[in-house]
Image (spheres, rainbow, N blue to C red):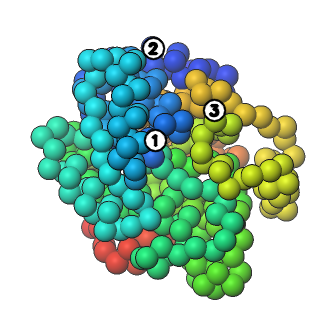
Amino acid sequence: MSTFTKYDANTPGSVLVRDYAAQIAGKTVLVTGASPNSIGYYFLSAIAVADPALLIIGVRDIAKGEATAAHLKTINPNVPTRVLQIDLASFASVRKAAAEVNAYPEPLEVLVNNAGIMAVPTYTKTKDGHEIQLQVNHLSPFLFTNLLINNLVSVRGRVVNVSGIGYGLGHIRYLDYNFHDGESYDPWRAYGQSKTGPMLFALSLAEKLGSSGLQAFSANPGISATTSLGRHVTDWTTLVVYFNAHKVQGNAEGFAPWGYADNDLIVATYVLAAFSPDIVEHNGKYLEGAQVADEDTILPWALGSREARKAWALSEKLIGQKFDH
């Protein structure tokens, strides 16, 4: 049973935008991975109608960010936009982007760590020395958020970490996060690890800073057929491997019917996580289907203070910086 039933998996994001228009209006919102035809792009497009104060478009490619900004102007010409260059495969780029945001005159009220990659077929290390999915999907958002934390706390802001059902494919491999330097690499297990991290990170933020007014959630937006996230999933065979991997784990996703969601449905859980005043008591929780997930359905490696503490410590170790909040 859900712990929040105002909406369900069939509620369009546009309905939530209408309901939370007052919470969206006047807000400064930063979304990473907001290139055209990404979930971040669709999310920004959905909320632009509600007159946010500023939409910050985090992208690796400036030209793509400018394309998103131009699109948002067609939706609401009065909404200010700003393009922020950030490459999550580089800690140096993340630090530079965070310094830029902290120098903005506007306080940051909502951070959506949306950018991500999935099922990179060949083991790849970043120049920082980490398996690329782990860094892009978890370590860099962990670093970016912590570098912006004083900014967010100052306005009792909100953090949304993208996760998804892929977390069920892998716990955090505390003793072998780099897969024996690629020797035992599996694209889907690596993806699973990188999606478990954001869930535990949201839990930690709520535990450490909830008393200061910070809200943090992890969100499963659903499966979209129109984004570039699945660019490495090139054929049906690859998807069969994905769902068979869920079956091996004994996960419900390996047996239940599934389908793609349209873009209005895809953004609904993001809107809930970023703006809903109705979920404050669920700080740190995992959201899916435009509601707070029932904890009895969440796999144990993505729950609890012990796992959150261990994931935080490993993340600090791999980044090489401690954050004493």
Residue 248, numbered circle: none
> Which element type, helix, strand or loop, lies under badge 1?
loop
On screen, 86 above or below 70? below
Dot 1 surroundings within 10 Å: few (below 14), some, or many (20 or more)? many
Residues at badges 1 and 3 in contact (C-beta under 8 Å)? no
On screen, 215 above or below 264? below
Q: Check disc 2 and report the residue beneath it.
A: 18
On screen, 174 above or below 204? below
Q: Amino acid at mark 2?
A: Arg
Q: Position of residue 234 (x, y in %)?
A: 75, 52
Q: Check disc 1 and report the residue beneath it.
A: 35
Q: Amino acid at mark 3?
A: Gly
Q: Nearer the viewer's eye, disc 1 or disc 2? A: 1
Whichever of labels 1 and 2 marks the residue nearer the N terminus, that label is 2
Whichever of labels 2 and 3 marks the residue nearer the N terminus, that label is 2
Q: Taking the image as drawn, is residue 246 in sight?
A: no
User: Would residue 25 be found to the left or right of residue 197 on screen?
Assistant: left
Residue 289, numbered circle: 3
Q: Taking the image as drawn, is residue 126 in sight?
A: yes
On screen, 35 above or below 179? above
